[in-house]
Image (spheres, rainbow, N blue to C red):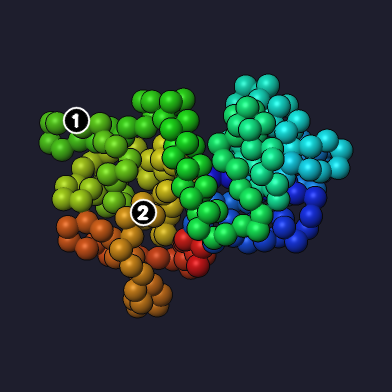
Amino acid sequence: MKVVVVDDEAPARDELVYLLKQHGGLQVVGEAEDAPSAMQVLRRERPDAVFLDISMPGGDGLEVARQLARQAHPPLVVFATAYDRHALEAFEVNAVDYLLKPFSEQRVAETIDKLRRLVKQRKADAHPLQNKIAVSNEDLITLLDPADIIFAGRRGREVFVKTYDQEFKVNYTLQGLEQRLDAEFFFRPHHGFLVNVNKIEKIEPAFQGYQLVMKDNTASRVPVSRSGMKEMKRLLGI
C-alpha cells in the first residue's frame, strides 16, 4: 500500500512517517508541507491513501480533499490534525478516518488496518476476475482465492501453488503469477519461490543464510536469497 503524508510541521510529519514505516507492506512514497506541493506529489505518485493535515499554507487539507474527490480514482483520505473541530467537515468530504495529534501507535495501527481493508476491496471491485487464480489438480480446475495461497514455487519447468493442505499446478510462469497477485502481500524471497507474507510462521537460520517456515500442514521451508532478505525486511518492517 502506497501512502503520502502532508503536514506543514516537520516534527509531526516525521513522527507520522516513522509510525507508518513500522508496518510491513506499506510504503511512504511522498511527503509535502503545503497544499500546492501536496497536489503535485499526489498527481505524480498516485498513492492508495493520503494522510492530510488541515491547517496548512496555500490552502487547507479540506480543499485538497475536495480536489481529490473530483478525480476518477482518488486516494483514500485520512485527516491527521491537532484539532477535532473539523471532524464533521472531514467526513463530508468522504474521509475514511480522523487522527488527532499527538499520534498513538495503536490509533495509527487501527487506521492502517482500515485502509488495508478498503484498498483490498477497491482492487477486488475493479478486477473481480483477477482476484482469482486458476489452478489444476489432475482434470479439475479450481478458482483459488489468493488469500489461500501459502506459497508458489518452480519445480523444473512446472510452477505449483501450495495451499494449507494441497498442491496445484498453474499455467503461469512464476513471474506471470507474481504479476497477478497483490505486491502488498506476495514477494519473491528467492528466484524460485513466491510467498504470501501473511503465511510466514517464522524466519530461521539456514546454511549460508535464512529460510522461511510457512504456515501449511507440513511447515514447508522456503529459502531466502540476499536480495529477498532485503525485500522481506522492508515488507515486514524489521
> Residue 108 in the image: x percent, y percent?
55, 53
Q: Secondary structure at mark 1?
A: strand
Judged from this view, the residue extending furthest toward the front is 85
> x, y (%) of residue 24?
49, 57
| Viewer-side label of 1, 2 | 2
| Type of the residue with mark 1 | Ile
What residue is shown at x 79% (from left), y 43% (from top)?
55
Above or below, comparing residue 154 to residue 115 in the picture: below
Q: Upstream in the sequence, badge 1 or badge 2?
A: 1
Where is residue 71? Give x, y as percent: 66, 23
Task: Tell me, yes or no, if residue 75 can be seen here.
Answer: no
**Number of numbered discs present?**
2
Along the line of sight, which residue is nearer the eye, 38 or 79? 79
Residue visible at 47% across and 43% down in the picture: 114
Marks 1/2: CA distance? Answer: 25 Å
Question: Considering depth in this image, is 78 or 151 the residue closer to the camera?
Answer: 78
Residue placed farthest to the right in the image? 58
Residue that badge 2 annotates:
198
- Could you say whether the residue bearing mark 2 is in a helix, strand or loop? helix
Tell whether label 2 touches label 1 (CB within 8 Å). no
The label number, if any, that marks residue 141 in the structure image: 1
